[in-house]
Each structure stands twice: as structure tokens, then as C-alpha cells.
Image (cartoon, grey):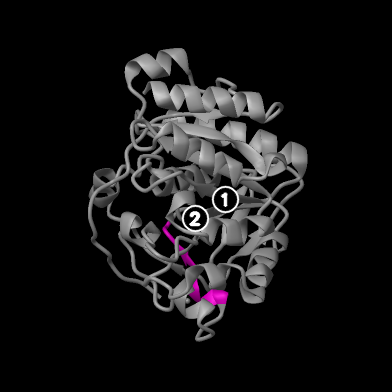
């Protein structure tokens, strides 16, 4: 615990002017995909009032609530007592990104097991619950894709087919029966992930997803920083970066090394994950580190 506090204090000193965000959850267990299949939503955005989304081509699938609960996807049910933490995180993220005009958010962690995928999924769902925004969640952890697994759905074709040139991105989109949310899962690990993420095809894909709808926040679940050079390959194409640090999962050195690889002008903040009661009292939700 102390090493995380020290590393975050150092991040505060190094990154003056950047927020840090805190919350707690747990990276879920093992592996259990399900299935699904097709293209994109039509948005009708009135000048005032909620954004209405009609899914005329994108496949809509119902999710298993028990599966979501087992994998700690708590934001899907607005009545969940744990949902408020992600709403607080959502509000902080949207405020900061709106100030900068940012639309693409990369979520990463120093090491595996920090809860970055669970955070990315719950944050995307919470944004979709916000009636003035739409959210897209893209599984860019090409070595160890888990978004579809945690949601309990398998889309064919998926992003791995898009990146191999076998499908269009619209064919890989799926709506998990929640208005204003689209997910682009990755079914299978992608060979030479760093080279793929630094390719012109991926840069074009990110730009297209960013510019297609003004009200959309595109969240990319990236690999851990220390797992390879994948994150460094794709960060130049991202507007902002959120670092998820699991309590006790990363050393002070790993956190500091990860922060060195994130451009200071794109660093949105740190989510302290799996925090115990003592940490939550000392580092309450919304507490600024930087």
C-alpha cells in the first residue's frame, strides 16, 4: 500500500495540473465467452433532451445479469449499490475531457491484474447511462482480449478480423441491449500486436471512430504498460490516458516506469483500484493527486 501512495505522490509532483481519480473494484476471474453477429447505430440528437439511438444495423444482444455480477460489471444495473463509484468517475472524466475537446480515452495499467478492463467496461456503461453522451468501448488489448469475455458475448466477426482485413469495423460492432453504448470486442489474440497498433490501418480506425459522432466518447482498453511496447505504439493516436493502479498489484518502480511512458499533456489521472477502507478515507473519490 505504501509503495502505491509514494508512487502516486511522485506522480502528483511530476504532473502538476493533471487530475487523479480514485475508485475501487476487482479484476474478475477466468474465461467464459458467449456468442453474437453485424454494422452501426443511427443517432438522432435533438438540441435539448436525451440523445435517442436507433440500432437498425448493429446487432443487439441481451446480457446475462448473473454473468455480469460474477465479473464485477456493476454499472449495467443502475440500482446496484456499487454503481455510484463509476458515476463519480464518469463525471470527472467527462468534465476533464470536455474541457480539452478530447474524445478518445485509453485505459491501461502498469501490470496485469489491476482491474483496467473492468474499469473500462463499467466506465463505458456509466457514460452510456448519461443521456447527453454515447459511448463506444473498443478492446485494444490485442495480446489478451477480455472485454467480450467479461460481458459474456462473442461477436463474429470481431476486431481481430477487422485488423486482419477480413471485415469492416461496422460488422464488428455490437450493442449490449443498452441505449447509447456500442462495443467492439476482440475474439482472439492478434500476432505482432505492437506492429499492428502502430500501423496506418489502426491510426485511420481510431481517427474514424473519433470523428464519426461529436457526442461519442471512445474508450480503448489497452494492454498493461509493462507487458510490452503495445501501449507506446498506440498512445500517439489517443487524446487522453487513464492509468488504473491495483492496490498491491504493482510495485512503486512499475508505477513510476509506467508514468514515464505516458505523455504528461495527455495524462488524465490515476484510478486507485481495489482500495481498502483506509485508502478510500484518505484518498476519497475525486481526490486530486496531481
Work out which quarter of the rendered image holds the N terminus and state it: top left
Answer with the quarter of the image where residue 209 lies. bottom right
Which residue is pictured at 63% across the width and 29% down the height? 19
Q: Does residue 96 appear anywhere in the picture?
A: yes
Is residue 172 found inside the magenta-colored segment of the image?
Answer: yes
Q: Is residue 237 above or below residue 278?
A: below
Which residue is pictured at 55% across the width and 36% down the height? 90
Badge 2 marks a residue whose secondary structure is: loop
N-term mark: 1 or 2: 1
User: Where is mark 1, residue-wise?
Assistant: 106
Is residue 232 found inside the magenta-colored segment of the image?
Answer: no
**Residue 207 located left or right of residue 36:** right
Answer with the quarter of the image where residue 77 lies. top left
10 Å crowding of disc 2: few (<14), some (14-19), many (20+): many
**Residue 238 located left or right of residue 190:** right
Which residue is pictured at 45% across the width and 13% down the height? 282
Q: Is residue 57 above or below residue 289?
A: below
The stretch of residues the image draws in magenta is 169-177
**Residue 117 located left or right of residue 52:** left
Work out which quarter of the rendered image holds the C terminus and state it: top right
Which residue is pictured at 53% across the width and 77% down the height? 163
Q: Is residue 239 above or below residue 249?
A: below
User: Where is mark 2, residue-wise?
Assistant: 222
Taking depth in this image into account, of 215 and 9 the one nearest to the observer is: 9
Badge 1 marks a residue whose secondary structure is: strand
Circles 1 and 2, Cβ within 8 Å, touching? The answer is yes
Amino acid at each position: 500500500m505504501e509503495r502505491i501512495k509514494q508512487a502516486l505522490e511522485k506522480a502528483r509532483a511530476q504532473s502538476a495540473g493533471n487530475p487523479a481519480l480514485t475508485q475501487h473494484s476487482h479484476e474478475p476471474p477466468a474465461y467464459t465467452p458467449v456468442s453474437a453477429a453485424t454494422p452501426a447505430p443511427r443517432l438522432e440528437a435533438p438540441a435539448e433532451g436525451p440523445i435517442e439511438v436507433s440500432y437498425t444495423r448493429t446487432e443487439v444482444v441481451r446480457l446475462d445479469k448473473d454473468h455480469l455480477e460474477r465479473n464485477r460489471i456493476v454499472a449495467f444495473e443502475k440500482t446496484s449499490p456499487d454503481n455510484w463509484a463509476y458515476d463519480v468517475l464518469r463525471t470527472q472524466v467527462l468534465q476533464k475531457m470536455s474541457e480539452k475537446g478530447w474524445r478518445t480515452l485509453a485505459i491501461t495499467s502498469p501490470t496485469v491484474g489491476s482491474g483496467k478492463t473492468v474499469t473500462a467496461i463499467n466506465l463505458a456503461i456509466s457514460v452510456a447511462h448519461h443521456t447527453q453522451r454515447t459511448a463506444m468501448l473498443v478492446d485494444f488489448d490485442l495480446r489478451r482480449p477480455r472485454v467480450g469475455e467479461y460481458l459474456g458475448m462473442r461477436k463474429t466477426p470481431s476486431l481481430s478480423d477487422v485488423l486482419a482485413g477480413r471485415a469492416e469495423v461496422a460488422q464488428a460492432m455490437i450493442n449490449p441491449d443498452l441505449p447509447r453504448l456500442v462495443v467492439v470486442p476482440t475474439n482472439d489474440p492478434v500476432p505482432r500486436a505492437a506492429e499492428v497498433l502502430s500501423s496506418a490501418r489502426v491510426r485511420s480506425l481510431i481517427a474514424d471512430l473519433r470523428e464519426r459522432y461529436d457526442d461519442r466518447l471512445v474508450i480503448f482498453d489497452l494492454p498493461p504498460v509493462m507487458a510490452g511496447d503495445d501501449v507506446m505504439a498506440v498512445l500517439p493516436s489517443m487524446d487522453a490516458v487513464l492509468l488504473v493502479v491495483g492496490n498491491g498489484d504493482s510495485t512503486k518502480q512499475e508505477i513510476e516506469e509506467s508514468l514515464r511512458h505516458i505523455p504528461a499533456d495527455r495524462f488524465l489521472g490515476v484510478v486507485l483500484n481495489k482500495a481498502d477502507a483506509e485508502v478510500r478515507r484518505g484518498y476519497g473519490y475525486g481526490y486530486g493527486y496531481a
